Amino acid sequence: MTTAQPLDVQPTPLALLLLGREADPRSERGVECPGDLPSPSDPDLVARARAAKEKLGDKVFVLGHHYQRDEVIQFADVTGDSFKLARDAAARPEAEYIVFCGVHFMAESADILTTDDQAVVLPDLAAGCSMADMATAEQVAECWDALTDAGIADQVVPVSYMNSSADIKAFTGRHGGTICTSSNAKRALEWAFEQGEKILFLPDQHLGRNTAVRDMGMTLDDCVVYNPHKPNGGLTAEQLRNAKMILWRGHCSVHGRFSVESVEDVRARIPGVNVLVHPECKHEVVAAADHVGSTEYIIKALEAAPRGSKWAIGTELNLVRRLANRFADEDKEIVFLDKTVCFCSTMNRIDLPHLVWTLESLADGKLVNRIEVDPETEKYAKLALERMLALP
């Protein structure tokens, strides 16, 4: 009888990244945080967070993205979407520490827009964004080579969604393009078509397609999808030359899960319901909805909604649940569009133990988890952001 030998199995770099361990400076997933986190069962976490924040006083400014869990949002000085929060941080130059309760690309944007004297901190470096990860600097450079080989690079203007890494924002700035949010995507595309004949839209294909077709009157035939995992993006030179919108094959893992079946099901269950979805949803879902808009649009629509109205919301569950509780006393019925619970898993990495560890470390004079964009990348990323800010 032989004795079984233990298998010498080593996790791959990709597996380690997915677990939030090891380092890849070009990945949104980041690295494992150093230090010991408080236990999530510690009943004193709220008191500890309050005490550390009070000790820091005006030295700290805490930003909370709409998709954060309530236990974190309660400590935010301001809440909002990614770009609003980055601008709020820039408007507080007296704050020594900017604690961004969001994901990696958001903290990068805040670092780009704040002063060199301010430190932007992400409570968990493994809080990344799957959409932002779908476009790397190397892949986008290869795409530009394909556009050059097709003879159209000089006609193409890149437009990158705010939900992208600093590297992609810098690429956009270098090539004469601009950044957009889900609120101003139409204005950004209109500006880009004044500069050139075609647009390379990064990294969310759905926002690009929905804006072009729904808001600007283009057709689905005007759009092609560039797949970075296929030679030449899986497209012929003729397809690239004929397209007006070259959409990167990326998507949001939360918004991409909603389906037409979800819309049909909620209409059957709740007669008279208003279906309101984010433009990161698939085109067929947007077409089936009653209303479409950004996170800020969703919040304002529900604020203005009449008492007793019914709403099914296609966006991240933390926000939907918070809005349902907020408007319950106005008899507004607000439900999640899909029957299946769907949090943004990476956004939810920012929890109370990580926030407490961050605030207590800063209060003790230890700077942790600082997010810094190198000067060359910052220069061109800021140029792209400034073009967006200059949009009429």
Image: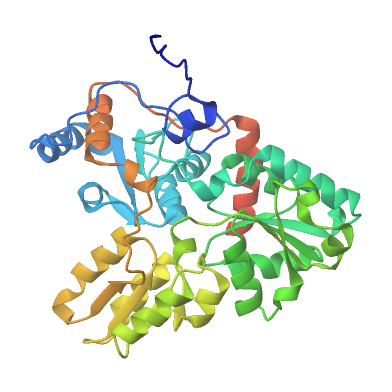
Picture residue at 34% right of the left edge, 55% below the top: 343
Would you say residue 60 is visible in this rendering? yes
Q: Quadrant of the N terminus?
A: top left
Q: x, y percentage for residue 194? A: 77, 68
Q: x, y percentage for residue 351? A: 26, 41
Q: Is residue 284 above or below residue 86?
A: below
Q: Residue furthest left?
A: 43
Question: Is residue 145 toward the left or the right of residue 53 in the image?
Answer: right
Picture residue at 36% right of the left edge, 69% below the top: 338
Q: x, y percentage for residue 73? A: 25, 51
Q: Nearer the viewer, residue 231 or 84?
A: 231
Q: Nearer the viewer, residue 202 or 305?
A: 202
Q: x, y percentage for residue 193? A: 75, 68
Q: Residue furthest front?
A: 1
Picture residue at 46% right of the left edge, 46% below the top: 106
Numbered disc total: 0
Q: Quadrant of the C terminus?
A: bottom right
Q: Nearer the viewer, residue 316 or 75?
A: 316
Would you say residue 392 is visible in this rendering? no
Picture residue at 26% right of the left edge, 48% below the top: 76
